[in-house]
Image (tube, coloured by chain):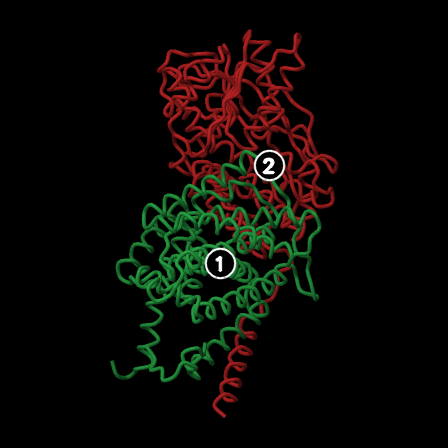
């Protein structure tokens, strides 16, 4: 008797809960006449927390756009969540956003992009810009790629560019590589080898020294690099390891020309490595964004700092993120008043030879091209700034 | 807590009507969750189910057998990549999953050998070395890790007219329930009692006829099997693997789940898994504060509730059982 009563009680409770929780779906998720909701999942904690500044920069730009009246009468509302650079947490964030957001902007991390990539086409939620190895998308089915727009340089193309630039423009005779011992670093190795193999005389890498992300003592690595006798060094580390290796090399009086990947393009490197070590280094810059010190970039940076004063000192990454938000805003503008995922896709595909606020190299999307711009240029660390020393080199878009 | 009058009663998993009532209610609530709950809660619970299997395994080793281990990330990676490679060769999901558990168990057995000689911090360091070694091997071997683009794993298709999220939910709910049942049965069997005897005093246990070599190695093998299964399920859920997903942070998460949930408690393992998944998610809006909230919550639980969440659960249960008397 007791058991029967228990069953009836339990079933009644769940029937009631079922009625309470049943909800009505909105016609287009995240869109009203006055508002469009954009989701962002980014590492604000964990090993890649520093890169989360990109999302804060994007949010500051959205706040600025809102103050200017929004897009087609709609204010942009940002839902920003921390994923700690963990793919499972990023997926949980996105699943939570489903039904609430209209689009997602500035996703960060190769593992995260790989683990969540199907989410966007499956749920018809556009993903506007993602910071991850672009080769993920190269072989991704075209129908699923419909909702994904990327403007990010290919690491291998960039390494090829660095190696070529070192020999042709800086007169490098022997080139060595310092790289992170993972897929990212190995891509750099392939790119550098490819670049050198295309040069007259086909010079070979004088040496390649890997390090582990968990390592902090890099004195032996510096010694090994010195033993290669290279006069030019390509660097594919994190910002911290880039600073550490250059400091260790300076200690043993080994100061070759150093060219780095664009992830070390933030002038914050002066603080990490020390002015005497960082001065004269050549960091690459991605074609889709700008660097502090350029008039167009500085104008945007001032706006960003006005809307989020905490971005002071993190201008490079903040600008990087703000440019992503500009891509989304441009797509929203082109999509018009009748906003649906498909109209945003069409709006994005209408972007042709467009420079966001005059920053970077022109971006083009089309139904056959969702890789907006794939390119690099060279900068030089001079007097606390990163000064561009070359024009953009644009590689073939990959998808 | 209960007055047990016979061995048969001791072996019963559910001894009171209300315990059974709440367990069945909880199961019904979980079975019908996709109907009344939001989709992201279904996903979060799927993660908790997956995690709870690994935490139960580690609790069998750390909580029940008293062997400290910091090699969890290594077993997770072994399970995940075994599953990933077999799935790529077209092996059925359940076969791949079983192999993921078995490969991790074999390595667990190997790592268990130092436990015959080492104790406490020395064993912790030996197992930590294993976790790091596995990570390094995967990072350095493109053949094992899937190369520069990582390892893409075929996801579960949507089955029985359910959505893919719900298919994953029910699949993992079923497995978590089976492993929970297995854990309860294991600890109330001779093997489980041997584990507990080793934890309480290994010399006495040996004097009582417990073969230390066999049971210590068995504890390592069983716990690694659970963790390997967790790795396999994780691979199946995410559909993508790369070695950087199995760093020391994963070991810490599993260890925290065991301690916060409560040592030597199956319910505690599930609560601990819920803790490490829910806290970062619930506070994901708090931006940079997530690690702070996480850390403070751990400190508070350990100060005010040394028995972990399962200890708090026991006290709450006792309070209601004794109510209105105290």
Determine crowd level at label 2: few under 14, some 14-19, many 20+ residues with C-alpha closer than 10 A: many
Rendered green, the chain in question is: B
Chain holding disc 1: B
| Distance CA(mark 1)–CA(mark 2) | 52 Å
The answer to whether A83 is drawn above or below residue B4 in the figure is above
Question: Residue A6 appears at what percent x and percent y?
Answer: 49, 85
Question: What residue is disc 2 on?
Answer: A327
Chain holding disc 2: A
Q: How many marks?
A: 2
Taking A369 as reference, is B302 left or right?
left
Residue placed most toward the observer, B52 or A122: B52
Q: Is residue A192 visible?
A: yes
Label 1: state its secondary structure. Answer: helix
| Picture colour for chain A | red
Residue A271, numbered circle: none
Is label 1 in contact with label 2 (beta carbons under 8 Å)? no
**Residue at 74% across, 45% down:** A143
Question: What residue is disc 1 on?
Answer: B222
């Amino acid at each position: 008797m007791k058991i029967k009563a228990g069953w009836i009680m339990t079933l009644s409770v769940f029937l009631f809960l079922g009625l309470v929780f049943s909800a009505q779906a909105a016609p287009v998720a995240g869109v009203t006449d006055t508002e469009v909701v954009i989701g962002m999942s980014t590492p604000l904690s964990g090993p890649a927390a520093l890169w989360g500044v990109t999302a804060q920069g994007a949010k500051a730009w959205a706040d600025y756009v809102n103050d200017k009246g929004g897009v087609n009468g709609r204010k942009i509302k940002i839902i920003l969540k921390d994923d700690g650079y963990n793919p499972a947490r990023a997926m949980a964030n996105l699943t939570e956003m489903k039904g609430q957001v209209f689009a997602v902007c500035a996703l960060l991390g190769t593992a995260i992009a790989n683990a969540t990539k199907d989410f966007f086409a499956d749920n018809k939620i556009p993903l506007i810009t993602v910071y991850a190895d672009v080769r993920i998308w190269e072989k991704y089915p075209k129908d699923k790629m419909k909702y994904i727009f990327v403007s990010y340089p290919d690491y291998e193309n960039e390494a090829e560019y660095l190696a070529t630039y070192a020999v042709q423009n800086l007169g490098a005779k022997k080139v060595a590589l310092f790289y992170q011992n993972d897929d990212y670093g190995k891509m750099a190795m392939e790119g550098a080898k490819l670049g050198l193999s295309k040069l007259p005389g086909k010079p070979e890498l004088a040496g390649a020294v890997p390090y582990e992300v968990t390592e902090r003592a890099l004195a032996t690595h510096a010694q090994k690099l010195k033993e290669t006798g290279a006069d030019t060094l390509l660097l594919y580390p994190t910002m911290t390891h880039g600073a550490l290796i250059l400091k260790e090399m300076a200690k043993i009086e080994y100061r070759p020309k150093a060219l780095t990947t664009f992830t070390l393009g933030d002038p914050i490197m002066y603080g990490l490595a020390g002015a005497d070590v960082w001065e004269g280094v050549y960091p690459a810059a991605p074609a889709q964004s700008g660097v502090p010190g350029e008039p167009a970039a500085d104008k945007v940076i001032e706006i960003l700092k006005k809307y989020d004063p905490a971005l002071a000192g993190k201008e490079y990454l903040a600008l990087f993120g703000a440019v992503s938000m500009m891509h989304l805003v441009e797509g929203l503008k082109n999509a018009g008043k009748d906003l649906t995922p498909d109209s945003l896709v069409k709006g994005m595909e209408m972007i042709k030879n467009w420079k966001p606020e005059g920053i970077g190299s022109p971006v083009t999307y089309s139904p056959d091209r969702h890789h907006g711009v794939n390119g690099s240029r060279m900068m030089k660390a001079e007097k606390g700034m990163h000064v561009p020393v070359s024009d953009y080199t644009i590689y073939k878009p990959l998808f | 807590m209960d007055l047990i009058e016979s061995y048969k009663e001791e072996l019963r998993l559910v001894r009171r009507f209300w315990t059974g009532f709440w367990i069945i209610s909880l199961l019904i609530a979980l079975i019908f969750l996709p109907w009344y709950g939001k989709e992201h809660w279904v996903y979060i619970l799927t993660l908790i189910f997956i995690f709870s299997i690994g935490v139960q395994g580690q609790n069998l080793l750390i909580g029940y057998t008293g062997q400290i281990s910091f090699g969890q990330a290594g077993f997770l990676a072994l399970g995940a990549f075994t599953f990933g490679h077999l799935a790529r060769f077209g092996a059925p999901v359940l076969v791949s999953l079983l192999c993921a558990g078995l490969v991790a168990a074999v390595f667990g057995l190997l790592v268990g050998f130092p436990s015959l000689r080492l104790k406490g911090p020395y064993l912790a360091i030996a197992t930590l070395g294993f976790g790091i070694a596995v990570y390094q091997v995967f990072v350095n071997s493109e053949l094992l890790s899937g190369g520069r683009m990582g390892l893409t794993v075929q996801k579960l298709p949507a089955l029985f007219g359910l959505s893919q999220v719900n298919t994953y939910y029910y699949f993992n709910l079923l497995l978590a329930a089976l492993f929970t049942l297995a854990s309860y049965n294991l600890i109330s069997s001779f093997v489980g009692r041997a584990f507990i005897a080793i934890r309480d005093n290994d010399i006495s246990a040996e004097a009582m006829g417990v073969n230390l070599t066999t049971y210590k190695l068995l504890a390592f093998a069983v716990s690694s099997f659970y963790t390997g299964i967790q790795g396999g399920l994780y691979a199946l859920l995410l559909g993508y693997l790369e070695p950087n997903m199995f760093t020391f942070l994963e070991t810490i998460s599993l260890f925290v789940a065991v301690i916060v949930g409560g040592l030597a408690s199956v319910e505690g393992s599930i609560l601990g898994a819920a803790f490490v998944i829910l806290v970062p998610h619930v506070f994901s809006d708090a931006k940079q504060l997530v690690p702070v909230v996480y850390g403070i919550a751990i400190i508070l639980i350990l100060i005010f509730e040394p028995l972990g969440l399962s200890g708090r659960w026991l006290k709450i249960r006792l309070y209601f059982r004794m109510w209105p008397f105290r």
